[in-house]
Amino acid sequence: MNLPSHFDGLAQAVFPPRPLHLAIGMFDGVHLGHRAVIEAAVQSARRSGGAAAVLTFWPHPSVLFRPNDPTRLIMDTPTKTDVLLQLGVDAVITQPFTPEYARIEAEEFIPHLKQHLPQLSGIYVGENWRFGRGRKGDISLLIAQGRHHGLTVFSAPRVNLDGAPISSTRIRQLLEAGDIGSANAALGYSYFSQGTVVPGKRLGRTIGFPTLNLPWAPGARPRFGVYAVRVAGKKSAQPLSGVANYGVRPTVEQTTEPRLEVHVLEECPFGEGDMLTIEWLRFLRPEMKFDSVDELMAQIGRDRIEALAGPKMNGRAGSR
């Protein structure tokens, strides 16, 4: 039975008649703490001959409860789905987080799941996960309710980095600060962007530093600045070293929305229309306004040297 790998909501989810092990959470960024939850579900599914799935949500609950200040997400849904599937789950269920869904009482949550997923055998969450109306449900209630309904419940302890718990909030703060090294350590892979190269104004080409322009509008924006990156695409067998500028280009244009431009430090096979993955490795410097294009060119030359001098690898984007 060939089933889809992604379902738009529990009402659409269909699984074969064998034990279903379900990891539940927002999983924004799919960081090391999230992976501990998901890998437990995958391993249990393999041992039992069952299936492993992830139940996640869209939009973020903050859109409903704090519409004027919603949480800015590290990943959009398609990217998150792709990364989750790479961890070995059989399917991802993206449940619309509506006012009706938010009103489900904590005591009714497991019966609600069982109604849509009769094969449900085990639930896998982080130790601080909350559920149900008003977030009244905690891990103790989930274990008790699971026992009552014949389900196993696994609670993964939080994963620490440098003495503090890893969380999506912490990673957003690290990205905003430009601490890409710590963000990558918490994620367990290199933070990455994906997009299709579009035409630019070709200013970089005229000053000797041609760039690839990628439309990219993340919810949680990294710090504006210059980064050492790696560039991957179908036209190269291996990722290529590069320098990326993310910001509003104050010296040459001052755009209203930030742009991502990448200069490849090796012979570049990529061009307009190519789909690329940009792995962010190191923060080199903040974006700044120069008094002249000549000063900008000189600084770009220094950026090239620094990018080439540093380490070229820091994990693999999304476990690619």
Image: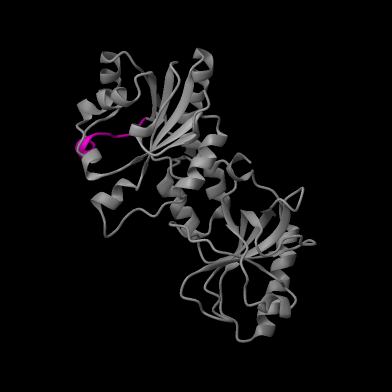
- Quadrant of the snapshot with the C terminus: top right
- The residue furthest bottom is 292
Residue 170 or 231: which is nearer the viewer? 231
Asked where in the image residue 292 lies, by quadrant, the reply is bottom right
Residue 264 or 273: which is nearer the viewer? 273
Say whether residue 128 is visible.
no
Residue 243 or 78: which is nearer the viewer? 78
- Point 69% across, 84% down: residue: 294
Residue 239 or 201: which is nearer the viewer? 201
- Point 29% across, 50% down: residue: 62
Q: Main secondary structure of the magenta part?
A: loop
Is residue 80 left or right of 96 when viewed as pictured? right
- The residue furthest front is 1
Q: How is the image coloured?
A: one colour
- The residue furthest right is 267
Residue 238 to residue 118: above or below: below
Residue 205 to residue 140: above or below: below
Q: Residue 158, position in %: x, y? A: 42, 33
Asked where in the image residue 56 lies, by quadrant, the reply is top left
Assess whether residue 134 is covered by the magenta stretch.
Answer: yes
Residues drawn in magenta: 127-135
Residue 163 to residue 142: above or below: below
Q: How many marks?
A: 0
Q: Residue 234, position in %: x, y? A: 71, 50
Q: Residue 5, position in %: x, y? A: 50, 34
- Point 75% across, 65% down: residue: 305
Say whether residue 42 is visible.
yes
Residue 109 to residue 177: above or below: above
